[in-house]
Every structure is written in C-alpha cells, then in structure tokens.
Image (cartoon, helix red, strand yellow):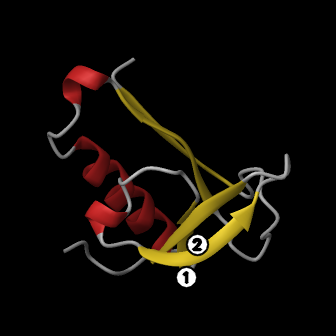
Amino acid sequence: MITGLSVIENDFHKLPDKAPNICAAYVKKEYRRKGIARSLLDHACKELAAPRDYGRLSDHRPHGVYERRSWEFYGMAKENDGAMVRMYHRKTGRPQK
C-alpha cells in the first residue's frame, strides 16, 4: 500500500462535536513530500462539503502534517485512553494555501 485515508465519526477522543474525523491517514515513506497527503486531505474535504454539508473535518494526530497545510489548531483533546493530543480542524469548503 502506498497511501490511504479514512473518514469516521469519532477517532477515539472525547470531543464528539468534532465529527467527522480523519482516520488512518498514511503515505508510505518513499512517497512522502510529493503532495500526496495534501491531495488526499483536499479530496476528503471536498467530498464532505457537498452534498453531505459537513462544515468541518477534524483530526488529532501529534505531527506537523496539519500545521504545514494551514489547518487550524482547535485545542487539546483527551483520547479515550486518557492521553492528551492536539486537535486540528479545517472547514471543508476552504481551499488549501
């Protein structure tokens, strides 16, 4: 597998109002830094904008992927196991910078 991305209702955190969530976003190491993750995230946001009308898409991974793609830092979220992680979100209709 080279890449993958899923969208689910809640990705094991205690902020149910931050749905839907990115889950299992992955790009194989030798294919990174080629714009693939950006394309996947943009596609997910576009697909959720209409006709589904989700206003935002969220994720809470502890890496710099979202900072580099102009997602907004929402705050800290508690995962179901008690760990604290950074939560990011992006309006689904907004183009990436």
**Residue 24: horizontal and vertical position, in percent?**
55, 38
What mark, if any, has residue 52 been given in the picture? 2
Which amino acid, by three-letter code, is at mark 2?
Arg
Quarter the N terminus occupies = top left
Q: Is residue 86 above or below residue 17?
A: above
Residue count near mark 2 (Cα–Cα under 10 Å), binned few <14, some 14–19, many ≥20: few
**Viewer-nearest residue: 66 or 81:** 81
Residue count near mark 1 (Cα–Cα under 10 Å), binned few <14, some 14–19, many ≥20: some
Residue 55 in view in this figure: yes
**Residue 4: horizontal and vertical position, in percent?**
44, 34
Which residue in the structure is indicated by mark 1?
Answer: 55
**Residue 50: horizontal and vertical position, in percent?**
48, 75
Q: Secondary structure at mark 2?
A: loop
What mark, if any, has residue 82 been given in the picture? none
Give the quadrant of residue 2. Answer: top left
The residue positioned 18% from the left and 46% from the top of the image is 35
**Viewer-nearest residue: 27 or 66:** 66
The residue positioned 19% from the left and 74% from the top of the image is 97
Extreme-left residue of the structure:
34
The residue positioned 33% from the left and 61% from the top of the image is 42
